[in-house]
Amino acid sequence: MHYDFELYLDNAINIRYHAVLIDMNKTERLIQKKNLLLATDGKPHSMKAAQYAIELANLASSKLYMIYVVSKSNESEKQASIDEGMEKLEELKELASASGVEATALLEGGDIYEAVIDAAERLQVGAVIVGTSGKSTLGRVLIGSVSEFIYRNSRCSVIVVR
């Protein structure tokens, strides 16, 4: 059995995670043979999400898309970000291939929030899988959370892996 962590916002300040036990068979049926999208930044919390996404894609006979977004930055950092993204996506693609999962890597530029939502709609995915770093409540309020934004704005299911 696996856990899916749904994000709830209380009064726009108190953020808490509510663990919901997921019946994997039910999840498989809901996304069976539908495209899945993994949003990654290559950090450890994203690797947990990647492992979950690969396992889910394998169980549900789904095609997995993996997106790494190079955010707007100054030109000197841009090439380093592109190289890092390509390296992380290649690692994930090899991991998926070793598990027998058909995976496509997407390296996109721009605003991470918009890029992930746009890719989910463009690819008509059944679910977006994202990791969360487990930042404190104050950190989320001040900085924002990619996983929270995707959860609140996506038209498809979102699985947040902690």
Image: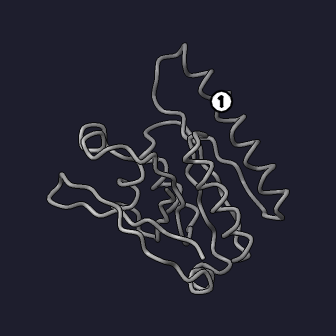
- Residue shown at 53% from the left, 68% from the top: 127
Q: Measured from the top left, where is residue 39 in percent x and y? A: 55, 51
- Residue shown at 43% from the left, 74% from the top: 20
Disc 1, SS: helix
> Dot 1, how many residues are within 10 Å of its Cα: few (below 14), some (14-19), or many (20+)?
some
- Residue shown at 24% from the left, 37% from the top: 142
Image vertical order of residue 55 relative to residue 14, above or below: below
Q: Label 1 belongs to which residue?
A: 84
Quarter of the image that includes the N terminus: bottom right
The residue sitting at the top extreme is 76
Q: Nearer the viewer, residue 122 or 144?
A: 144
Q: Measured from the top left, where is residue 131 in percent x and y? A: 51, 52
Q: Nearer the viewer, residue 110 or 39?
A: 39
Residue 127 placement, left or right of 88: left
- Name the kind of residue labelled 1 in the image: Glu
Image vertical order of residue 159 relative to residue 40, above or below: below
Q: Measured from the top left, where is residue 87 in percent x and y? A: 72, 34
Residue 67 placement, left or right of 62: left
Q: Measured from the top left, where is residue 141 in percent x and y? A: 24, 43
Q: Nearer the viewer, residue 57 or 65?
A: 57
- Residue shown at 59% from the left, 78% from the top: 31
